[in-house]
Image: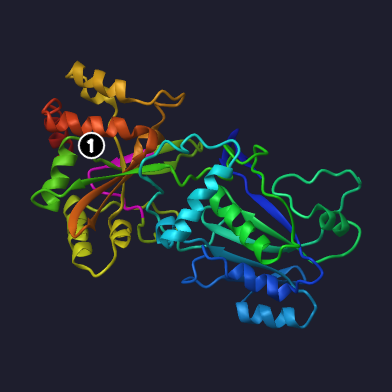
Amino acid sequence: MFIYWDGFEIDGSDTDFNIVLPENVQVQEFVDCFLSVHIFNKDIEPSVSYYKSGKSIDISVDELKEKILTGKNPSFSIDVNCMHLERLPDDLRAKIYALSSRREPHEKAFGKVENPCAAPVLQGYYGRGEMTVQLNVCMPYKSQRDDFEFKGYVNNEELLRAATSQVRYCFEINVGPNFYYEYAIFIIDYLRDSFPGLGTWGGLDCANGWTDGCTYASSIYSYEKIHLPVELSVKNTLKKLTEYNIVRSYRKYYNKKWQREYEYTNGFFLANHAPVEQGKPQKPITFDEYVDLVETSFASDTDSFAKVCDTAAQIMLPRAEEFSQNPEAVKLLQAALPQIEDEQKEWNYTGYIAFTIVDEKPVCEFRVRYMMKEYFLTLLKLMDAGMIDFIKSVTYERRHD
């Protein structure tokens, strides 16, 4: 599904995996299996909606199971969220990465990233898309043609065709814009392994495939993780990076014409910011507040990834032309730019900065777009070589406006 406003697409597409249960599988068995999928976040209670007389009523999982046991097969939906990739056990994370080889065609980033990672953003709400998965009850697909072609992730086509001529209990598993291909396949494989007779089809994105569409627009290879040692102090490290313009935070939003805009700040927009009142923009925290946040995180008894999430802030790398006072620096940066069609698009320059502890030592962690890794490393080399010292006067004036 697409939503358009004045000719601009402002919402991506979702997709459904259609599922027909074999006769020997009870509805409650299937629901229990769905809720037990290993990549689902068990710390957040599923959101269950029960539909009666055209109205949606929120109920608990236990209440839903009671209704299912009556044998009346109530109409309902269940929302669950997947865990962040770095919250999965090592063996499970390895299985997720292994699924990428089955994607046809492979996404551009596959096989090109040395230390792949996703955005350090935790989703604590249910929504259409991102990390939310929805299980819906539905009526069987009724085809007027005997030669109807089931497309996508097809399994047990005989059962699927039988479902068009007799009433069977059917489900849809819906995933929305910016979901992970690997997560979707893992969920369906888990259910099919649990119930080998399951009938499935669908799951293709808006481009009628598995790659380059809107549904699977997020990638487990989007970012490259790079660690810099914290020298002297957090404040010293951060001061150096900001005065060379390598770190500058921003907020993304859409204007009244639904065009993407970027608002820069001398402070920091946190990736996992506290909820704000609807209609009001997110507010940045100051440089000193961010340093205090990092120091507090370092002092807390949390794991490495928790510290990343606590301190992750959105950044946008500077463009080569910002260093035009030194043509040699510009030349080196331009040579490091990726040879891609949309290399000048703002989102390619976006990423995250965070601070964490690795091997008992404090580090500054960057997550930059995988194709921009060489560009980012070139920025660091120019800084260390003193080739862009002139930019410090510009950033000083900006910080003190």
Residue 226 inside the magenta-drawn segment = no
Q: Could you tell me which residue is drawn at 58 percent across and 44 percent down?
A: 102
Name the image quarter holding the C terminus. Answer: top left
Percent across and percent down for residue 104 are: 61, 38
Q: Which of the two residues, 352 or 359, is positioned nearer the viewer here? A: 359
Q: Which of the two residues, 7 or 245, is positioned nearer the viewer here? A: 245
Residue 269 inside the magenta-drawn segment = yes
Q: Is residue 401 visible?
A: no
Snapshot quadrant of residue 140: bottom right
Mark 1 highlights which residue? 246
Q: Could you tell me which residue is drawn at 69 percent across and 74 percent down?
A: 29
Rendered view: 75 above or below 327: below
Rendered view: 366 above or below 165: above
Dot 1 amino acid type: Ile
The image shows a total of numbered marks equal to 1
The secondary structure that most of the magenta stretch takes on is loop
Q: Could you tell me which residue is drawn at 60 percent across and 33 percent down?
A: 7
Residue 142 shown left or right of residue 279 in the figure: right
Q: Could you tell me which residue is drawn at 67 percent across and 49 percent down?
A: 203
Q: Which of the two residues, 294 or 4, is positioned nearer the viewer here? A: 294
Residues rendered magenta in the picture:
262-271
